[in-house]
């Protein structure tokens, strides 16, 4: 179950089926990203693909009859029409057409009628309709999927297509479960089920004759766990996304001061960069020492025993050492990134902020935490965005606490000129009236399993105060693989497949409202322990994008659960 390998196989297939000779590839906006996240341009050149064109942007009318054309596009109405126009007036000698998802027969017929010159050699469906970020993580790049707490129609359609494509590329026909009480996940589960039923011949994969349980598609709702996207992260990939933002495996540093010209835009792909692949889940301290070890190793080769003690020393060393510079393009790139992370961490006092975030997420110590929050958010050295996140975490944790003082904290935010409406919006989006599951470990005495789990957690103590928090997803998946009863909280939509008492061997999780790199780390750890899990979502959030999604989703909704914060709400929500 490796998504990157699956996409690569599809691309290899496209390039080999078109035969030897010079080729051009015709893409749309989405498939350009899909290919670039799996293959570099030099990889495509090795496969004799010399030109890349977009079907949906201005192109020259020059005829290049010596070139074959591979077309790889999503089967949207707009793309079908653009392709029909291309086939009526073909520029290339032959066309090999591949759609990234299921295409209706009527569209195939329409394209055949347009191909009067009979230049089409191949038409196929290749199920690569998602962005593979890590081998076990995919995204659909839908930054906002809700309006007034209901699905945006385009986002819903795109999610159905994306999930269907993942299932077909992994050859899975799963039991589909969704989070009970979540209309968004129930509707998505139903539409995915309808699609798998309608295309039953495509989903006719291996049977369960040997008694193994069928795979599981678990559709969850971000609203059950609003805490994970708000926390500051300390593993490499998650930290880069939180502080610098990763878009389609690229990091834009063009706005940052003192970044060398060659490093204004960096590609961070575990598949194309060995160092990143090995260290994306390493924590901040380990990354610094790993780079230091690499540099010292190269220094030894050059018989230079000069010690490297700080990031500033490392930067200077690389600038003045051409031979090393040649050998270590990758190290330079990561040194540039970690230099930026280091600057931002110190500038924003993130060690202090993050420790308090983790305390709020993991421990119920109301009065002590309230005093620490008041002190921190009034401190001008703490950025207003970090201050708002602390108040948001407090509001989520102590929403029903007798002495909850969210309004008092919002008053401090207001005096600093912060966006106070974020906190009431977040409570409406994911307050206790919405959430199911055990987000803050507020366990009933009757739940023996969870009580024991929490006692063990308490006895073990904390290895690292910055990484105490465990996403709700990890506990949910542990319950799945231990074969615990899922039915009341996660009912199955195709219950005829469910008489199996054994836990599933393969699980695909999709989170409506976006996933996080912290959850991807949990999935990575489970996969390392021998399980098979793929994680995906409408998008991959950092705290900023999550807050924006919450504001978009609650825009125009009349707030019913934040009466005490009414003067801090947006006028649209009153």
Image (spheres, rainbow, N blue to C red):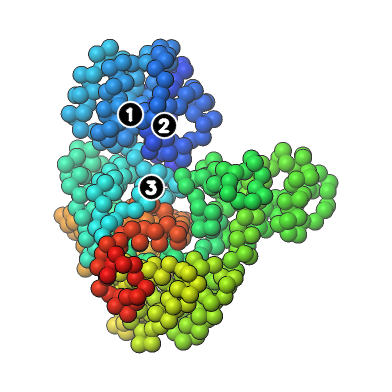
Looking at the rendered image, the disc whose residue lies closer to the viewer, 2 or 3, is 3
The residue that disc 1 covers is 98
Q: Residues within 10 Å of mark 2 (few under 14, many from 20)?
A: many
Q: Quadrant of the C terminus?
A: bottom left
Q: Residue at 26% x, 27% y: name it.
A: 81
| Element under disc 1 | strand
Q: Is residue 210 left or right of residue 92?
A: left
Residue 297 location (% of width, % of height): 74, 49
**Alpha carbon distance from label 3 to label 1:** 21 Å
The residue that disc 2 covers is 11
| Element under disc 3 | loop
**Alpha carbon distance from label 2 to label 1:** 10 Å
**Alpha carbon distance from label 2 to label 3:** 21 Å
Q: Nearer the viewer, residue 511 or 535?
A: 511
Q: Earlier in the sequence, mark 3 or mark 1?
A: 1
Q: Earlier in the sequence, mark 2 or mark 1?
A: 2
Q: Residue at 26% x, 52% y: name it.
A: 152
Q: Residue at 83% x, 48% y: name it.
A: 304
| Element under disc 2 | helix
| Circle on res. 81 | none
Looking at the rendered image, the disc whose residue lies closer to the viewer, 2 or 1, is 1
Proximity of marks 3 and 1: CB atoms separated by less than 8 Å: no
Q: Residues within 10 Å of mark 3 (few under 14, many from 20)?
A: many
| Circle on res. 141 | 3
């Amino acid at each position: 179950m490796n998504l990157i390998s699956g996409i690569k196989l599809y691309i290899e297939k496209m390039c080999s089926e078109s035969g030897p000779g010079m080729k051009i590839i015709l893409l749309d906006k989405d498939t350009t990203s899909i290919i670039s996240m799996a293959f570099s341009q030099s990889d495509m050149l090795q496969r004799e693909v010399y030109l890349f064109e977009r079907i949906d942007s201005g192109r020259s009318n020059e005829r290049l009859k010596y070139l074959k054309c591979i077309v790889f596009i999503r089967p949207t109405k707009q793309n079908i029409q653009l392709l029909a126009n291309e086939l009526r007036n073909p520029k290339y000698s032959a066309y090999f057409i591949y759609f990234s998802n299921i295409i209706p027969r009527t569209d195939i017929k329409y394209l055949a009628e347009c191909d009067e010159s009979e230049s089409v050699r191949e038409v196929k469906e290749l199920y690569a309709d998602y962005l593979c970020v890590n081998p076990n993580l995919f995204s659909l790049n839908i930054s906002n999927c809700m309006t007034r707490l209901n699905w945006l129609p385009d986002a819903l359609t795109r999610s159905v297509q994306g999930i269907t494509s993942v299932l077909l590329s992994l050859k899975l026909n799963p039991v589909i479960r969704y989070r009970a009480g979540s209309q968004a996940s129930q509707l998505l589960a139903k539409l995915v089920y309808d699609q798998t039923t309608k295309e039953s011949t495509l989903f006719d994969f291996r049977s369960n004759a040997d008694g193994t349980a069928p795979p599981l598609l678990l559709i969850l709702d971000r609203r059950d766990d609003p805490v994970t996207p708000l926390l500051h992260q300390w593993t490499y990939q998650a930290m880069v996304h939180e502080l610098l933002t990763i878009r389609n495996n690229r990091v834009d540093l063009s706005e940052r001061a003192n970044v060398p010209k060659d490093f204004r835009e960096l590609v961070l792909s575990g598949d194309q960069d060995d160092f990143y692949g090995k260290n994306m889940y390493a924590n901040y301290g380990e990354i610094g020492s790993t780079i230091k070890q690499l540099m010292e190793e190269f220094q030894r080769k050059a018989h230079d025993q000069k010690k490297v003690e700080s990031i500033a020393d490392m930067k200077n060393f690389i600038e003045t050492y051409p031979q090393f510079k040649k050998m270590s393009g990758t190290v330079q790139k990561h040194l540039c990134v970690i230099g930026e992370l280091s600057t931002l961490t110190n500038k924003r006092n993130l060690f202090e902020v993050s420790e308090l975030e983790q305390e709020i997420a993991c421990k119920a110590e109301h009065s002590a935490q309230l005093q620490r929050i008041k002190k921190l958010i009034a401190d001008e050295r703490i950025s207003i965005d970090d201050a708002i996140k602390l108040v948001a975490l407090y509001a989520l944790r102590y929403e029903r606490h007798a002495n909850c003082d969210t309004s008092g904290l919002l008053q401090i935010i207001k005096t600093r000129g912060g966006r106070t409406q974020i906190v009431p919006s977040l409570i409406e989006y994911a307050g206790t009236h919405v959430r199911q599951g055990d987000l803050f470990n507020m366990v009933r005495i009757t739940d023996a399993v969870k009580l024991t789990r929490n006692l063990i957690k308490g006895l073990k103590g904390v290895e690292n105060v910055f990484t105490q928090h465990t996403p709700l997803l990890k506990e949910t998946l542990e319950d799945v693989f231990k074969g615990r009863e899922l039915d009341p909280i996660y009912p199955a939509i195709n219950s005829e497949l469910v008489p199996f008492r054994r836990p599933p061997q393969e699980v695909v999780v999709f989170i409506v409202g976006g996933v996080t790199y912290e959850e991807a780390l949990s999935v990575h750890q489970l996969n390392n322990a021998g399980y098979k899990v793929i994680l995906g979502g409408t998008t991959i959030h950092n705290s900023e994008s999550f807050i924006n999604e919450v504001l978009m989703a609650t825009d125009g909704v009349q707030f019913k659960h934040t009466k005490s914060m009414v003067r801090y709400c947006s006028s649209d929500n009153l």
